[in-house]
Amino acid sequence: MAANRKSQRIEPSFQTSGGRDDDDLSVGAGDRVAGGGRKGRGGRPPKAERPRRGSAARHRAPSGGIFGLLRRLVYWCVVLGIWGAIGVGGLVLYYGARMPSATSWSIPDRPPNIKIIAVGGETIANRGLTGGEALSLENMSPYIPQAVIAIEDRRFYSHFGIDPLGLARAMLTNVTTGRMVQGGSTLTQQLAKNMFLSPERTLERKVQEVLLALWLEHKYSKDQILAMYLNRVFFGSNSYGVEAASRRYFNKSARDVNLGEAALLAGLLKAPSRLSPARDPEAAEARAQIVLGAMREEGYVTDTEIKTAMSQTPARTKSYWSGAQHYAADMVMAQLPGMIGDIKEDLVIDTTIDLDLEKKADETLSTLLEKEGGKLNASQAALVSIDGTGAIRALVGGRDYAESQFDRASKARRQPGSAFKPFVYAAALEAGRSPLSVRNDAPVKIGKWMPENYDQKYRGEVTLASALANSLKTIAAQLVMEVGPDEGIKLARRLGIESELQSNASIALGTSEVTLVELTAAYAPFMNGGYKATPHIIRRISTADGKVLYENTYDNPPRVLEPAIVSQMNGMMMRVITEGTGKNARIPGWQAAGKSGTTQSFRDALFVGYTSNLTTGVWFGNDDGKSMKKVTGGGLPAKAWSQFMTAAHAGLSPSPLFGTANGDALQDGARPAPQEGGDELFDIISRTLGTDERPAGDGAAVASDQTGAVPLDDGLIPPAEVGGERQTGTRRTTLFDFLVGG
């Protein structure tokens, strides 16, 4: 081949041609080697070759058209799809390997719920982390699952845990609107997230969510998954599950919610805190309207039902749980751990609360505070009512539980004022005095303390019964020094006072602080014939399947007062209501007894009283200790006591107080015969005069509630530290005292 190329070599010619100058060097076309060598700088291919190249170009043109473009697009989509699947599979394998083995997966236990019920079987409240018990789909309103499916996952019953169509639809909607409008997670995915995963938004968590959703769909039925979701999902305002949310927002069970309420609950799932009717009722209602539209599109409801639901009044909910029964529920929860220890399963608590009485007590206090509280500067009130065993039948810890959850009935310690006097008088009766013992209402000085009656007047000789009825401070001070402060404290302890009591003279006037619950329970022995009444609210604790963990009937109380003492005290405290400081506490047709109490500067006002059926204590005041406008125990508290007790005794047959059925307990035949002190003096004088009649000064004069104004009150109490000098032994009224009135 080299020889051929060499033989074909053409040497340049320097011959002249065609009028060209001899000096020009030129090479003709025929001088070039065909098919070899490089083309000249200005050379062109022969004209005969051009059609062939153009023909080839025209032959390839169809492969670059629209069909070719489509083929290439399909090709690359397939390629990318394969690689994408490989990538997704790799991620699933990677993140799946980081999870525990599927054989160990299990549904976490729902946090224990504590169901608190009244004596009539009504639910008072649910407590626990969820705030409500779990319900099956069959036990909840059918509107609830329909509304949730319509707005959250319309293909719930057709997908396999994840919904590619729903995800694609959500992505398209979000792209077209330019913002996040829809989510692609199914109810199963949401359940998986809520039960197993953290709320953080990461790729790993999303992959794990999908895997868990597939596992849930494999292991449980659709109805089981939906029920688990509805009983665990957050509905705002510390409510988890439809039962808790229904009671929180509508004060009813999820069994009873209507179409409009179900739509509101379903609407909360998008943004539970922001859309809560407790925060923004208008936004919650607007969202509910959207849910109703979705339910109509899915065929769950008719146009008529939609119209009816839309015409219903929107839910208006307070920012917190409302209703006085929640004070009782809080008391239950405070006592529960001490009875059974840690709570590890659902419990049912049977209480002593009567919901009818609870509502009457709440209404009574609310009405009086609304009508008179403002003008009298009284902002708060509390009430507790118990039966003869100490069972708490009604408990109101404040004006509005939604505004303040502090229980002023069981936690607040306040001075009881003259409401403490019955314990001192009972101690005096045990020491040998009688209701008809005479004492001199005159100025008294004990150490540096000189107690004065409210009206700063003195009545001379009065019986103990009259002195208690009219709340004479001078007589109470004398009695406490006669029997000794310690004896009064011992008796109060026996009857149920557990708070710290200071041993000084002023204890007779209630300077030591106590709770309303313990003070009221300490009055119950006067009602039940002398037996201790331990205040209690829990009757029985059971598991959800009926296993009893705790039960106490308190049916064997110890005796703390002798029947004769109880009878005498009942006769004395009846006079408080019939003729003394507690006239506002009268109950038509019923015998009632009690005692009022007012503390220094009108900071606290109380009335504690009882019938043969209930013992009830009422308190009015202010949380900050500010003075009320001359509110006394015989004023607002006595009115509230009367209104509540009248309502509580409606329809019941009246029965007499203990020891009063056979006549006046204050008659001579009803009291012990030999007495010491004032009664010895009276016996001497009566024998001398030949009469058993008591002095005419038997308390005919009544202490005034305010100086020259409202009658009948016990007045103010001294500071607790006064009266520190205590006399020992028994003080006797002398003949000289009786004759000179000093």
Image (tube, helix red, strand yellow):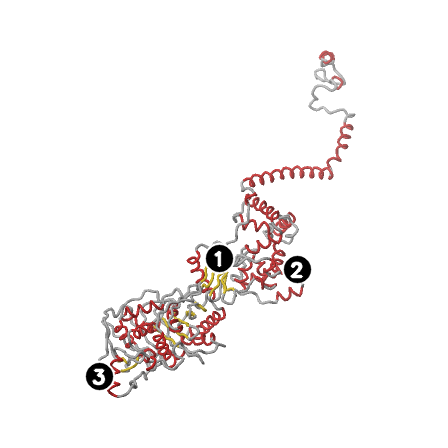
Residue type indicated by callout 3: Val
Q: Is residue 40 above or below residue 627?
A: above
Q: Is residue 35 above or below residue 236?
A: above
Which of the two marks, 1 or 2, is nearer to us in this view?
1
Between 320 and 103, the one lying in front of the other is 103
- Provide residue 318's location: percent of width, then percent of height: 50, 64
**Residue 724 appears in view:** yes
Q: Which residue is mark 1?
A: 128
Question: How far apart are labels 1 and 2 at the CA level?
Answer: 34 Å
- Provide residue 251's location: percent of width, then percent of height: 53, 65
Q: Is residue 699 above or below residue 615?
A: below
Which of the two marks, 3 or 1, is nearer to us in this view?
3
Residue type indicated by callout 1: Gly
- Provide residue 115's location: percent of width, then percent of height: 50, 60
Between 173 and 134, the one lying in front of the other is 134
Element assignment for label 1: strand
Report which quarter residue 687 is drawn in: bottom left
Q: Which residue is mark 3?
A: 740
Count residues near mark 1 (Cα–Cα under 10 Å), then give few for <14, some for 14-19, many for 20+. some
Question: How far apart are labels 3 and 1 at the CA level?
Answer: 69 Å
**Residue 606 appears in view:** no
Q: Residue at x 72, y 23 (%)?
A: 43
